[in-house]
Image: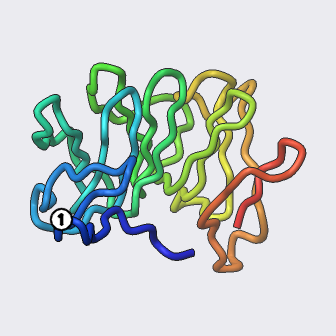
Amino acid sequence: AQLIENFYYDYSSGALRTRWPFRKYSTTSPDNSGVDGVYFWNDTMFFSCNNKLFNLDANLAYVQLGDIGTEPPSFLPFHNKLQIASGIGLQQVDTSTMFSTVSGTGMPTTVKQLYEQNTRLWAIGNSSYPNYIHGSKVNDETIYSGTGTTYYELGQSNDEAPLIGMTKGPNGTIICF
């Protein structure tokens, strides 16, 4: 699919105009590198560039929240927090924009993508188990082992085909690829 351009040339005024509902917040990223992830949650714009997570404050100034991994981030609202997967351990931002690494039981060590299904957080990208999909306990993003949790091995561990993505499938299933 082609990218949608967020501006157009207004022949009547001779100026570039921003298309609705897009807005121009800045002409550069915080460190002049490319933006590799954007997500709007809890009335706040979050974005990442150069392995760092930022948001925009009320004056549209950049606020660095912390360091993230080297993978393009996967953002997912879950349990009143914004969960972030970027190739390292699971991270999150709460409603006060407090950034932290999630700690818990049986946590995947590296997470590349997240998905929520039936009030459980699903994660892929664990470097130790690249062909596993990990499911958290219901309503708890901090527990990945023990009663009420699960993981599924898809394919052979030595087939050199790690999981790289997942999406919603038919009838409540998750499609992994």
Judge by depth and name the residue closer to the eye, 133 or 177. 177
In this view of the protein, which residue sits in the foreground, 139 or 129?
Answer: 139
Q: Which residue is mark 1?
A: 13
Which structural element holds mark 1? loop
Q: Is residue 125 left or right of residue 161?
A: left
Residue 7, compared with residue 30, is above or below; it is below
User: 85 left or right of 9?
Assistant: right
**Residue 172 falls left or right of residue 112:** right
Q: Is residue 145 left or right of residue 4?
A: right
Outermost residue to the front? 12
Farthest residue to the right: give it. 171
Residue 90, compared with residue 157, is above or below; it is: above
Above or below, 140 relative to 157: above
- Which residue does the image show at 54% across and 53% down from the upper left? 113
Which quadrant holds residue 31? Answer: bottom left
Question: Which residue shows up at 34% across the image and 51% down it?
Answer: 22
Q: Residue at x 26, y 26 (%)?
A: 98
Q: Residue furthest bottom?
A: 160
Quarter-wise, where is residue 63 in the image? top left
Q: Quadrant of the N terminus?
A: bottom right
Q: Nearer the viewer, residue 75 or 42?
A: 42
Q: Quadrant of residue 153?
A: bottom right
Q: Position of residue 169 (x, y in %)?
A: 80, 53
Viewport quadrant of the C terminus: bottom right
Looking at the image, residue 15 lies above or below residue 87: below
For the rendered model, the colour scheme is: rainbow
Given residues 2 and 146, the one toward you in this image is 2
